[in-house]
Image (tube, coloured by chain):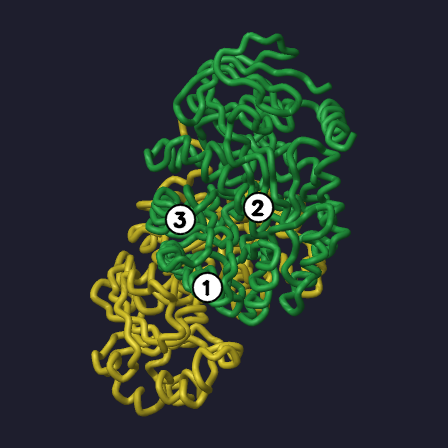
Amino acid sequence: MTETIIVRSARLSDGTSGDILVRDGVIAELGTVSSPADRVIDADGLLALPGLIDLHTHLREPGFEQSETVLTGSRAAAIGGFTVVHAMANTSPVSDTAGVVEQVQSLGDAAGYVTVRPIGAVTVGLEGKQLSEIGAMANSRARVRVFSDDGKCVSDALLMRRALEYVATFGGVIAQHAQEPRLTEGAQMNEGALSGQLGLAGWPAVAEEAIIARDVLLAQHVGARLHVCHLSTAGSVEVVRWAKARGIDVTAEVTPHHLLLTEQLASSYDSRYKVNPPLRRDEDVRAVREGLADGTIDIIATDHAPHPVESKECEWEAAAFGMVGLESALSVVQTSVVDTGMLDWADIARVFSRVPAQIGQLAGYDRGIAVGAPAEFTLYDPKASRVFDTSHLHGKGINSPYLSTTLPGRVIATIHGGYATVLDGELVDAETISRHSAVQSGAHHG
Amino acid sequence: MRHLLSTRDLGRDETIAILDVAEDMAGVADREVKKLPALRGKTVVNLFFEDSTRTRISFEAAAKRLSADVINFSAKGSSVSKGESLKDTAQTLAAIGADAVVIRHHSSGAPLVLAESGWIDAAVVNAGDGTHEHPTQALLDAFTIRRRLHGRAARGKGLDGVAVTIVGDILHSRVARSNVWLLTTLGASVTLIAPATLLPIGVREWPVTVGYDLDDALAAKPDVVMMLRIQSERMHAAFFPNAREYSRQWGLDDERLATLGADSIVMHPGPMNRGLEISAGAADSAKSTVLEQVANGVSVRMAVLYLVLSGTRLAGERPATNERTAS
């Protein structure tokens, strides 16, 4: 059987404190627990948050295993406090058939650190020409509900309309990477005074905002649900706010790095700061924080984008877009919106667990840490402080913008499926995890 | 001076000191034997990821007049075009023993990345990076203006009160950027004239006056009119309707040339598109400094190579961040 775990004296995000008993993969008791247990975790001073759910992760497998694999990305997720990641479709082959999404899901199950939910491509090969086999992916063992061409925008308005209509029939959602391609040809960084001075081709805010504006109107017209990936500008926040006020069924995400970092970092031409969408101005950072606080932006998602060293160890224009984010996400969120007083930990549980589960249609996360709910949670020490370095990274990528900076907080333990994936701030070894995972799936199917 | 990467971080005293050393270097060109032994035994590599024969031979002449050994490394037809990274190229040059690397690169910021990478310890001189900067061009332009204004008495002087109008493709021009920072540091007032499509967003935050109408700008009788080259690929990317319309509105033709003041000068960084941004009459007039700019370019580049390779600390120079602090 699976192990029984008692977590002693954890503080919950609603402010109450108590023990948590984990038995047979579920939260069996809360409060003062006196039952025997195989393992006791002292959580005095630690915060228990429901398992974090990332709606936007690049796991790179199949096809780009030099950057990340499902296993290494799952380990990076677990140490960051995640229990679910949604694997983006820009793999090779592209996740545009039932076969590929089932493969990604089973690799995730075998790794056992987190639940891996594949995202299906909207169009064949992410080419923006023809819808992929969305129905087959939805009906596959992977039961795909989120579809995205992320990395590329579904820029053809008619194709986007059709995709929205098509997924609405089974309650799916299109997660749009909002980037007007013609306005961003060769673009390198946010367009403004700084891009002009640095001589880096500008990426105007309007290239994002115009697509979001078009898509919310399309979603309204066909009565479908739209999710906006990694919203990054003040104007985008306004468009989504306007759409929600009109009752349009739209959700939006923001990344931890867009909550914290600004375009000024590009002045160093250090390509760790090169990301899509680009880092924006101070006023944009303020606007996305406010949007997250007032509910205009529904969730936080990492856009974890690992790259091999050589893809970043070069001049800016030659470098790949993207930064790793799973391992640092909770710390960056703490420093940008919790320590600044804009969100409390109950809000974080909502925007980083409950609502992402709703968007991805995942069961078991609607009540957070509650008796009878699946044992998916993380223990976090918000009082810790650390100089973030490569020893804190557990995926294959070291392209983090936070190296050598001081970040608050640290994940001490993560419980997934009733077993620990992280203990004492360290990952549990892969063999132990896959043994637990096999027992778990045996319990499900047997 | 450890490197020369941009004019934006050059102070006024430092800039004047470089121009004064360039005055000394200019004297060498007038001698029968055009050579100084200053950099004997030093190796200067011209690392050109973009073709630019004019800039390369100018740096080559400068290094040779200072007795340095010169290696020309052109990315075209080399392993670089087969995908070798900047890192591998830099480490190769370090292994060869380069003391200075003069780099021309299509990617903005590449010289800074090279200087701060730790891949090579050599002095780095930016010979033009993407649409960012071309600092030696701005230095030679400032040198040329100063000489026209003050002749042999130029030493120690800035460009206070000089009105400079720069016309053309500001958006893509590293020459314009380097000149904006350098000329304003020296006290000049700079006006930029271009179609709106060829001005960067945010240009109004630069320390310049911006306008669209060349005739209005010329009516203000600027001391210097600097015409920028229009690249043919801009015409195909809808920045303006066609060459004729550009030439009519933003070209320095003979009629416009005639409106200039008696002492005003016409500059162009070359190579010129005669008949497009500048008429033959303007290019060949007595006001034109095009060939002086080329000659002065060698003197300025001699000064820069000498300063970075001799480790001379200039007046007003801020200590380099990667330099060991003296105890």
Of labels 3 and 1, earlier in sequence is: 1
Marks 3 and 1 share the same chain:
yes
- Residue A296, percent across and down? 39, 49
Q: Residue at left 30%, top 66%? A: B146
How packed mark 3 is, by other alpha carbons closer than 10 Å (few <14, some 14-19, many 20 or more), is some
Q: Is residue B267 visible?
A: no
- Say which amino acid is labelled 3: Gln
Of labels 2 and 1, earlier in sequence is: 1
**Residues under labels 3 and 2: Cα distance?**
34 Å
Which residue carries the number 3 mark? A264
Quadrant of the rendering where the N terminus of chain A is positioned: top right
Q: Residue at left 34%, top 54%? A: B15
The label number, if any, that marks residue A220 in the structure image: 1
Q: Is residue A105 visible?
A: yes
Mark 1 belongs to chain? A
Which residue carries the number 2 mark? A360
Q: Colour of chain A?
A: green
- SS assignment at label 3: helix
Which of B183 and B46 lies nearest the eye of the viewer? B183
Q: Colour of chain B?
A: yellow
**Residues under labels 2 and 1: Cα distance?**
20 Å
Quadrant of the rendering where the C terminus of chain A is positioned: top right
**Residues under labels 3 and 1: Cα distance?**
37 Å
Of labels 3 and 2, earlier in sequence is: 3
Q: Are the two marked residues, 2 and 1, in contact with CB atoms closer than 8 angstroms? A: no
